[in-house]
Image (cartoon, rainbow, N blue to C red):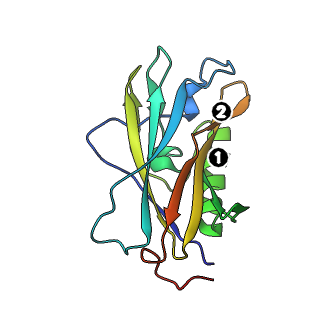
Amino acid sequence: MQILAVLILGLLGIPQASPASALANAGPYPGFTLQLSRGHRRGEFPRDTQALVVRMTNTSKEVIREDACSTGGNLYKLIILYNGVQQEEPSWRRKRREAAEAGEERGGDCPGVSNPSRDINPSDYVEDFIFYETPNPGTYEFIVEEKTFSQNSQTGVVKSNPLTVVVSPEDAQAPPK
């Protein structure tokens, strides 16, 4: 099965978060949570495209700043299980995420990225959208995780809840295997 995942920044008029800066106080506490839910399918996408909503909530008492590396969910790793078998992260997506992670390790230095930084206030949240093709009938389980960074080189991983989507043969583009 060929995997195609397209990450699109959801611009809902809500400020975006900086998971990279969430650990700026050098502690292991990440300062945010990730919640994954199913969005509404939009008409311009094929019938087998799933809309996943990633909600990042600032759980700290400080403003989190999004920088050029972390903008638009670049740091999100999408973990996919299809009928219980983990699928490979698409190479283009993995390379993009790894470049953003390397930039965060350099303190937010992502050459060639000119996105403006944005802020997320305490208790506020942002939502990013991931569109993922599910061309075969079966059970898909999605989890989003994000590596966190701090100024003293501590890293951690924040994981979302799992989201299960069952694709019927009628909703799949490809015939059952």
User: Residue 22: where, in percent of width, then height?
Assistant: 55, 27
User: Residue 125: where, in percent of width, then height?
Assistant: 39, 31
Position of the N terminus, as image quadrant, is bottom right
Residue at horizontal 28 percent and vertical 44 percent from the top:
12
In this rendering, position of residue 169 left or right of residue 81: left
Q: Which mark is residue 26?
A: none
Secondary structure category for the residue under label 2: strand
Q: Is residue 101 placed above or below 94 in the rendered structure?
A: above
Residue type, numbered disc 2: Phe
Mark earlier in primary sequence (2, 1): 1
Q: Taking the image as drawn, is residue 144 in sight? A: yes
Q: In the orientation shown, which residue stands out farthest toward the bottom? A: 175
Residue at horizontal 58 percent and vertical 61 percent from the top:
140
For the residues labelled 2 and 1, the Cα–Cα distance comes to 9 Å
On the image, numbered disc 2 is attached to which residue?
A: 149
Secondary structure category for the residue under label 1: helix
User: Residue 58: where, in percent of width, then height?
Assistant: 46, 25
On the image, numbered disc 1 is attached to which residue?
A: 101
Q: Taking the image as drawn, is residue 76 in sight? A: no
Q: Is residue 64 placed above or below 11 in the rendered structure?
A: above
Graded by Cα atoms within 10 Å as few (under 14), some (14 to 19) or many (20 or more), the crowding at tag 2 reads many
Which residue is nearer to you in this view: 144 or 161?
161
Q: Is residue 61 placed above or below 127 in the rendered structure?
A: above
Position of the C terminus, as image quadrant, is bottom right
Residue at horizontal 30 percent and vertical 47 percent from the top:
11
Q: Are marks 2 and 1 in contact (CB under 8 Å)?
A: yes
